[in-house]
Image (cartoon, helix red, strand yellow):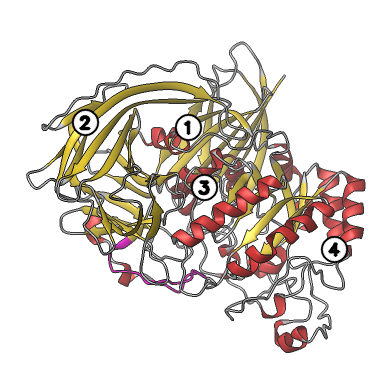
C-alpha cells in the first residue's frame, strides 16, 4: 500500500446528543445517536436532502438480550484517513481511500455489554458495521437477526432480483419500491436454486433512482465469516431492513468476540457515473494478504464450454441415460463428448494462433453422467479423467504451444466432498501445470439444509480462495455467493459468476437487452464477473432449426461488453469456427486488454446505457465500449481521455445501419479514423446494440 497522506485526529468524549459527521467534500452529512429507550439510530443527508431518514440499528442474539436497545453512548472517536494503494489487477493503477470515520462506543446498561458501531463517510457514500470488543459479558454468541434499517424517503425506481438464498441468476426487475412483489415473477426463467423467498424480499446490491434524479445503491462489503444480507422491503413506507440468510437450523451467524460484521454501504450521487466509478467497496476490504503476487496474471481464454450449451457436445462421456453404467465404471462413449484430447488440442492450437492465454476444459473428469439434481455426496473426485482425455498429453501439448490450461471443478453442491478432496485436487492441478480453476456449485448444498448465501458457504468460498493462494492458484467461482470486494484481500480471486451470465441466452428466455446495462450498477460493484461475452453466432437456430433461443444483443454489443464488463479473466466464449467466419470483428477480441491503468465512465444510466473507456496497464492504448438497452441510441463522445498532443488510430466496430438485436443482430461495420484528445466521435447504437473502439497511438 502506498500511503500518500494519512491524517487523523481523535476526539474521545461522552455525549448524549446526536453526533454529526460530514464526508470529505461536505456533500454528505451523517447523524448518529440513541433514542429515549436506548436504540441506536442514524440518518443520512446528501446536499441537505434526506436520503435515509431515522433508521435503527442493532443485533439480535439467540437466547439472550438483544444488542438493539437499552444503550447509552459512552464515547466517540473521529478520524480522517487519506491514502492511496495499488491493486494487483484492476480498473485503475492507483486507488484513493479517503474517508472520515466516527466510532461510537455503546454500553448496554442492563447487561453491562459493549458494542461499537463504526461509520465511514466517503465522498460517494456511507459505510458502517458493528464491532463486538472482547469482554467477559459476551464471548461466544449466536446472531439470530440483524435489525439494520434503511428508511428511504421516496418511492424510488428500483432494479431488483428476488431474495433467493441459493441463486442470483435472475433477470432484473425494474419497478417502483411500492410495486415489489416476488409472487408475480416467472420463476421458471432459469436454473436458479429457488430457495425460499418472501413476497417483498430482494437481494442486495439494489440500485435505486428517485423521481428527482438521485441515485442510491444499498449493498455490503467485506463479507467474511457472516451470511449474505438480503433486504426485506415495506412497500408502503419504503423501509428496508436487513435479512440474514440462515443456516440449516435457522441460526444466522456464530461469532466469538472480538468480532465484526460486514460493512453495510449506501452509495449516493446525482450522477450515475459516480456510482460506477466508486471504489468504496474495495476500500472497505483488508489489504492483500498475499505477499508475492507475481504469479497472479490477467487472462483471456477460450474453451470447451459453449459447444455444450448449444447442444453440439456433452459434458458427460457415456450419456446421462447411462448413469448406472457410469457408476459401475462401464463407460461407453456416446460420440458427443466435448472434452477429448483431440478436441482440446484444437482449442490449444486456436489459442496459440490468436494470442490467448489459456484454455478451459469442462467435462474432462468422471462423474458427469449422474451429477445434476441428485443430491449425491461423492459424484466427483477431481483427479480422475475420462478415458478419452489424456491429462499428461494435454499438458505437454499446451506447454509446447505456450498456452496455460484452466481446470474445472464442478462440485454439484457437495461442498463437504470438495473440501475433503481439495488438497489432492490442487496438487493434481499443479502437477499438470494448471494455475487457474473454475469452481462450480450447481445444486442443493451438502451439508444438507445449508444455503449458498449462508455463513457456512461464505466461509467455504473464502477458504477455497485462501487455500488456493497457498498453491499459487487463481480462482474463478461460479454459483457462489456474490463478491463483496474480498478480491482486494485475496487478489487470486480473479473472477466470479454470481449473476445471470451469457449462458442463459443459449437455452432459456435469455437475458433481455437491458441486462448488461444494469449489472454494472449491481453485481459488478462487488467484483469482476466471468460473464463469458463474445458470442458471434447469435441465434441458436444455427445449431438446430427448431430452436428459438438467441443472444439478446447485436454482434457489436458483444464486442463492447469486453470493456463495459470489467474482469481480468475474459473468455472468448463462442466456438473457434464462428470466430473464423468473422475475422475482422474477432480482431477486437484479440486486441482488447483485461488489466487497466485508468478507467473513465463517460455515460451511464441504469437500465438504459453505459459507455466506458479504459487505458491498458503500462501502455498508451485505450479501448472503449458503449452499450444500450432495447432502444436504439445516438450520442457523441469527446475522447479527451487520450494523451494530449498524441495522434491515435481509432478502429470503430459498430452496428450496421439496419442492425437490430432480434431482427438483424449480426449486421456490423468497421471503420478506421485518426483522432486526438480534441476529437469527437458520433456513436449510433442499434436496438440492443453497442460500439467498441480501439485506440492505438500512431
Which one is in front in this view, the residue at disc 1 or the one at disc 4?
4
Tell me the element at label 3: loop
Mark 1 — residue? 601
The magenta-colored residue range is: 186-201
Of callouts 2 and 1, the N-terminal one? 2
Which one is in front in this view, the residue at disc 2 or the one at disc 1?
2
Mark 2 — residue? 75
Tell me the element at label 1: strand
- Residue 686 numbered tag: 3
- How crowded is the residue under tag 1: few (<14 C-alpha within 10 Å), some, or many (20+)? some
Question: Is the Cβ of the residue at disc 1 closer than 8 Å to that at disc 4?
Answer: no
Image spot of residue 659 (x, y percent): 57, 51
Outermost residue toward the front? 136
Of callouts 1 and 4, the N-terminal one? 4
Indicate whether 275 appears above or below 223. above
Question: Is the Cβ of the residue at disc 2 closer than 8 Å to that at disc 1?
Answer: no
Q: Is residue 199 magenta?
A: yes
Question: Is the Cβ of the residue at disc 3 closer than 8 Å to that at disc 2?
Answer: no
Of callouts 3 and 2, the N-terminal one? 2
Tell me the element at label 4: helix
Query: Can residue 32 be seen in the rendering of this structure?
Result: no
State how far apart marks 3 and 4 are (Cα).
Answer: 36 Å
Q: Is residue 369 magenta?
A: no
Mark 4 — residue? 343
Amino acid at each position: 500500500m502506498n500511503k500518500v497522506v494519512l491524517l487523523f485526529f481523535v476526539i474521545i468524549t461522552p455525549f448524549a446528543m446526536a453526533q454529526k459527521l460530514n464526508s470529505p467534500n461536505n456533500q454528505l452529512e451523517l447523524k448518529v445517536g440513541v433514542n429515549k429507550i436506548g436504540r441506536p439510530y442514524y440518518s443520512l443527508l446528501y446536499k441537505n436532502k434526506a436520503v435515509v431518514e431515522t433508521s435503527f440499528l442493532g443485533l439480535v442474539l439467540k437466547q439472550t438480550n438483544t444488542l438493539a436497545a437499552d444503550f447509552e453512548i459512552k464515547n466517540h472517536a473521529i478520524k480522517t484517513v487519506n491514502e492511496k494503494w495499488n491493486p494487483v489487477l484492476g480498473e485503475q493503477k492507483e486507488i484513493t481511500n479517503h474517508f472520515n470515520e466516527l466510532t461510537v462506543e455503546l454500553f448496554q446498561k442492563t447487561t453491562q455489554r459493549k458494542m461499537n458501531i463504526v461509520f465511514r463517510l466517503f465522498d460517494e457514500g456511507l459505510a458502517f458495521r458493528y464491532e463486538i470488543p472482547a469482554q467477559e459479558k459476551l464471548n461466544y454468541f449466536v446472531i439470530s437477526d440483524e435489525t439494520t434499517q434503511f428508511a428511504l424517503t421516496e418511492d424510488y425506481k428500483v432494479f431488483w432480483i428476488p431474495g433467493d438464498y441459493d441463486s442470483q441468476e435472475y433477470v432484473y426487475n425494474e419497478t417502483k419500491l411500492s410495486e415489489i412483489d416476488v409472487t408475480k415473477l416467472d420463476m421458471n426463467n432459469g436454473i436458479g436454486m429457488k430457495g425460499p423467498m418472501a413476497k417483498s424480499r430482494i437481494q442486495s446490491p439494489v440500485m435505486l433512482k428517485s423521481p428527482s434524479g438521485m441515485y442510491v445503491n444499498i449493498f455490503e462489503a467485506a463479507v467474511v465469516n457472516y451470511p449474505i444480507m438480503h433486504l426485506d422491503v415495506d412497500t408502503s413506507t419504503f423501509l428496508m431492513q436487513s435479512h440474514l440468510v440462515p443456516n440449516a437450523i435457522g441460526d444466522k451467524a456464530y461469532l466469538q468476540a472480538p468480532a465484526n460484521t460486514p460493512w453495510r454501504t449506501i452509495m449516493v450521487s446525482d450522477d450515475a457515473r459516480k456510482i460506477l466509478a466508486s471504489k468504496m467497496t474495495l476500500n472497505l476490504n483488508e489489504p492483500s494478504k498475499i505477499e508475492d503476487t507475481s504469479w497472479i496474471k490477467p487472462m483471456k481464454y477460450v474453451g470447451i464450454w459453449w459447444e455444450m450449451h448449444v447442444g453440439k457436445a456433452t459434458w458427460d462421456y457415456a450419456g446421462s441415460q447411462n448413469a448406472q453404467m457410469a457408476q459401475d465404471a462401464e463407460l461407453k462413449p456416446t460420440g458427443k463428448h466435448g472434452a477429448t484430447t483431440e478436441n482440446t488440442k484444437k482449442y490449444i492450437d486456436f489459442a496459440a494462433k490468436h494470442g490467448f492465454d489459456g484454455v478451459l476444459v469442462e467435462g474432462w473428469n468422471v462423474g458427469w453422467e449422474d451429477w445434476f439434481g441428485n443430491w449425491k455426496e461423492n459424484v466427483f473426485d477431481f483427479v480422475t479423467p475420462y478415458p478419452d482425455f489424456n491429462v499428461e498429453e494435454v499438458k505437454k501439448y499446451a506447454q509446447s504451444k505456450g498456452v496455460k490450461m484452466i481446470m474445472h471443478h464442478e462440485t454439484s453442491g457437495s461442498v463437504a466432498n470438495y473440501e475433503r478432496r481439495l488438497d489432492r485436487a490442487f496438487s493434481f492441478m499443479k502437477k499438470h501445470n494448471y494455475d487457474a480453476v473454475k469452481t462450480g456449485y450447481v445444486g442443493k448444498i451438502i451439508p444438507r439444509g445449508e444455503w449458498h448465501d449462508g455463513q457456512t458457504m461464505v466461509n467455504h468460498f473464502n477458504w477455497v480462495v485462501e487455500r488456493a493462494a497457498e498453491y499459487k492458484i487463481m480462482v474463478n467461482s461460479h454459483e457462489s455467493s456474490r463478491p463483496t470486494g474480498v478480491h482486494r484481500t485475496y487478489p487470486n480471486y480473479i473472477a466470479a459468476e454470481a449473476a445471470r451470465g451469457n449462458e442463459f441466452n443459449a437455452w432459456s428466455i435469455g437475458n433481455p437487452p437491458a441486462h448488461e446495462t444494469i449489472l454494472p450498477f449491481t453485481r459488478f460493484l462487488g467484483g469482476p464477473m466471468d460473464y463469458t461475452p463474445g458470442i458471434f453466432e447469435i441465434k441458436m437456430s444455427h445449431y438446430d432449426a427448431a430452436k428459438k433461443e438467441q443472444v439478446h444483443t447485436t454482434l457489436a454489443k458483444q464486442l463492447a461488453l469486453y470493456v463495459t464488463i470489467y474482469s481480468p479473466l475474459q473468455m472468448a466464449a463462442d466456438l473457434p469456427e464462428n470466430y473464423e467466419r468473422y475475422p475482422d470483428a474477432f480482431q477486437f477480441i484479440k486486441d482488447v486488454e483485461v488489466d487497466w491503468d485508468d478507467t473513465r465512465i463517460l455515460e451511464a444510466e441504469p437500465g438504459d446505457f453505459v459507455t466506458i473507456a479504459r487505458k491498458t496497464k503500462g501502455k498508451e492504448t485505450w479501448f472503449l465500449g458503449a452499450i444500450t438497452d432495447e432502444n436504439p441510441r445516438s450520442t457523441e463522445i469527446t475522447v479527451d481521455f487520450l494523451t494530449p498532443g498524441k495522434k491515435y488510430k481509432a478502429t470503430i466496430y459498430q452496428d450496421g445501419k439496419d442492425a437490430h438485436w432480434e431482427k438483424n443482430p449480426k449486421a456490423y461495420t468497421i471503420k478506421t479514423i485518426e483522432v486526438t484528445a480534441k476529437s469527437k466521435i458520433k456513436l449510433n447504437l442499434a436496438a440492443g446494440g453497442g460500439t467498441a473502439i480501439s485506440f492505438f497511438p500512431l
